Amino acid sequence: RLATLKYVLRRVLDAASVIGEKFDVELLSTVLGQDSLEVLETLNVVAHSTSLVCVEENFYRFDHSRSRETLYEELSPPLKRGYHARIAEKLESTKIAPLPFSDLAYHYAEAGNKDKALKYAFDAGQDALARWSNVEAINHFSYVLRNIPEAPENAETRRKAEEGLGDAYYSNSMFKDATRTFEDLSKRQTGADKLR
């Protein structure tokens, strides 16, 4: 019975460590396929018997990033990928508006689903740029440009990502990087796109 309890506690903590330092119980219970009340009870036991997790408003969080990292690093790579894939699928299927593009990009990338990671990284870059989160936009657009295959069907996405990267550099007062990005972009464009 004690071994079963330890397994249940560890399973909840393992899945939570993949979600992140701060995690939502509804998402966690959906990922685990458990009733949210059962997950809350398990987290309550962990919070009262250890200092691994604590309540923060409507969320739980790990007491320290090191605790989360230790649990996460002990997972086998296939199990990590499986959890990341399940988390991404559950986030994608929720009716949260707007979708958490950055989280989706991260979890799909870690799950090894490059196509969806690229799609959501591009969306996250555009979203970050619209919110003036320039460093975040730079990171997302750079990820897209590093990972998107050089193929004719990706030309428009690549152009928009490079343009977004240049805009983010410019808005972040990184003028040399912005100039280099726009010059590289203009070399590959023709007509109205080149003028823009």
Image (tube, rainbow, N blue to C red):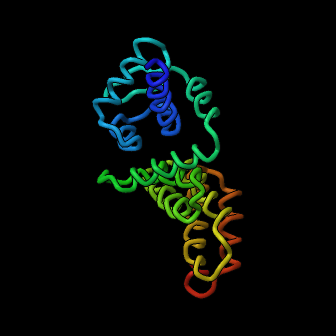
Quarter of the picture containing the N terminus is top left
Q: Is residue 26 visible?
A: yes
187 is higher (above) or lower (below) than 165: below
Point 35% across, 56% down: residue: 93
Q: Position of residue 23 (x, y in %)?
A: 42, 34
Q: Position of residue 144 (x, y in %)?
A: 61, 62
Judging depth in this view, the residue of 173 and 89 nearest the camera is 89
145 is higher (above) or lower (below) than 27: below
164 is higher (above) or lower (below) than 31: below
**Which residue is at the far bottom?**
191
Residue 8 sits in which quadrant? top left
Point 64% across, 44% down: residue: 77
Q: Position of residue 140 (x, y in %)?
A: 57, 55
Q: Position of residue 35 (x, y in %)?
A: 29, 36
Judging depth in this view, the residue of 111 and 82 nearest the camera is 82
Quarter of the picture containing the C terminus is bottom right
Q: Is residue 132 visible?
A: no
